[in-house]
């Protein structure tokens, strides 16, 4: 019987994996440069990168553009709390996470026009948010609000509004109703780049639409999380007899 001989990049991956799992290389530690590792193992950088790709696919190593390859910390799940709360809407149980926000005015495409019930081309305020735990992105959100509901100055490049923009009730009072649609799907190219995940990894996608007492949509949010790093919790409240009679 002929036995297959492991290729060199598998041998290198096995050696690095052992160093990572047994402790010589610690979580969060930067690996030597690819050139240094290739020299150490006496292989080409192509072979070395194939070995690193195996470890990246296993979630043991993360490549950060411009910085190098790092040992990933053990994955820790965040919790998305459904419904309307007082904290950041898409990482409601993880207020300590660092969040970056980019704001702009955009025109509603057909999808956003349908979600917000506005004519295509209507001006919207867009808040593009990414949450991080140290260097690792944990989730992203695109939050859209009709432009006429945005107070003056909010879209200016001022840090003072960012804390307000990160709250669940982004710019006003809690809405009368919130509808959330949840699915698991492949990531978009933008999500692959922003979350630094492989294109084969599933994401948990949540579309949240909030309306006021008149039925007007006051916010639509498109949220995405790496599927293996989040739990979603939704609480159902019983309808009271008084509300039933009012209906």
Image (spheres, rainbow, N blue to C red):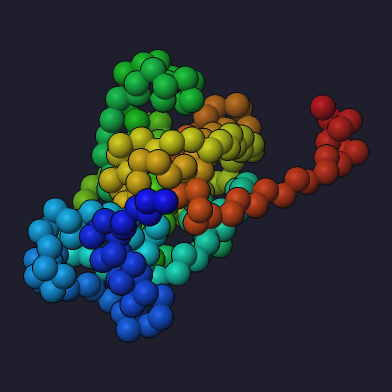
Compare residues 171 and 15 and report the one nearer the observer.
15
Horizontally, is 138 left or right of 246 in the view? left
> Which residue occupies the extreme front position in the image?
1
Q: Quadrant of residue 92?
A: bottom right
Observer able to see residue 216: yes
Q: Quadrant of residue 68?
A: bottom left
Numbered-mark total: 0
Q: Residue shown at 41%/25% (left/top)?
A: 112
Horizontally, is 236 left or right of 90 in the view? right
Q: Residue shown at 41%/81% (left/top)?
A: 22
Compare residues 37 and 194 and report the one nearer the observer.
37
Residue 42 x/y as whole percent: 11, 68
Q: Quadrant of the C terminus?
A: top right
Compare residues 38 and 131 and report the one nearer the observer.
38
Instruction: Determine whether 201 is above or below 74 in the image.
Output: above
Instruction: Determine whether 74 is above or below 108 in the image.
Output: below
Q: Residue shown at 30%/71% (left/top)?
A: 16
Observer able to see residue 67: no
Residue 94 x/y as whole percent: 50, 64
Q: Residue shown at 31%/56% (left/top)?
A: 5
Residue 40 x/y as whole percent: 13, 74
Compare residues 167 and 171 and report the one nearer the observer.
167
Residue 127 x/y as whole percent: 34, 43
Instruction: Determine whether 100 is above or below 82 in the image.
Output: below
């Amino acid at each position: 019987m002929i036995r297959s001989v492991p290729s060199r990049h598998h041998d290198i991956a096995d050696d690095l994996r052992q160093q990572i799992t047994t402790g010589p290389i610690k979580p969060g530690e930067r690996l030597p440069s690819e050139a240094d590792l290739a020299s150490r193992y006496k292989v080409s950088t192509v072979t070395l990168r194939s070995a690193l790709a195996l470890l990246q696919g296993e979630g043991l190593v993360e490549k950060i553009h411009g910085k190098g390859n790092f040992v990933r910390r053990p994955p820790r799940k965040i919790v998305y709390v459904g419904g309307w709360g007082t904290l950041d809407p898409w990482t409601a149980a993880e207020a300590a996470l660092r969040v970056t926000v980019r704001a702009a005015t955009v025109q509603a495409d057909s999808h956003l026009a349908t979600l917000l019930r506005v004519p295509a081309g209507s001006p919207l305020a867009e808040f593009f948010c990414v949450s991080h735990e140290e260097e690792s992105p944990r989730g992203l959100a695109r939050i859209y609000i009709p432009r006429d509901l945005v107070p003056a100055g909010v879209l200016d490049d001022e840090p003072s509004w960012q804390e307000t923009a990160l709250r669940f009730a982004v710019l006003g009072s809690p809405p009368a109703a919130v509808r959330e649609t949840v699915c698991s799907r492949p990531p978009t190219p933008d999500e692959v780049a922003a979350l630094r995940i492989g294109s084969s990894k599933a994401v948990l996608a949540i579309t949240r639409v909030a309306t006021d007492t008149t039925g007007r949509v006051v916010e639509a949010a498109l949220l995405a999380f790496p599927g293996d790093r989040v739990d979603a919790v939704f609480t159902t409240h019983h309808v009271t007899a008084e509300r039933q009679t009012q209906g």
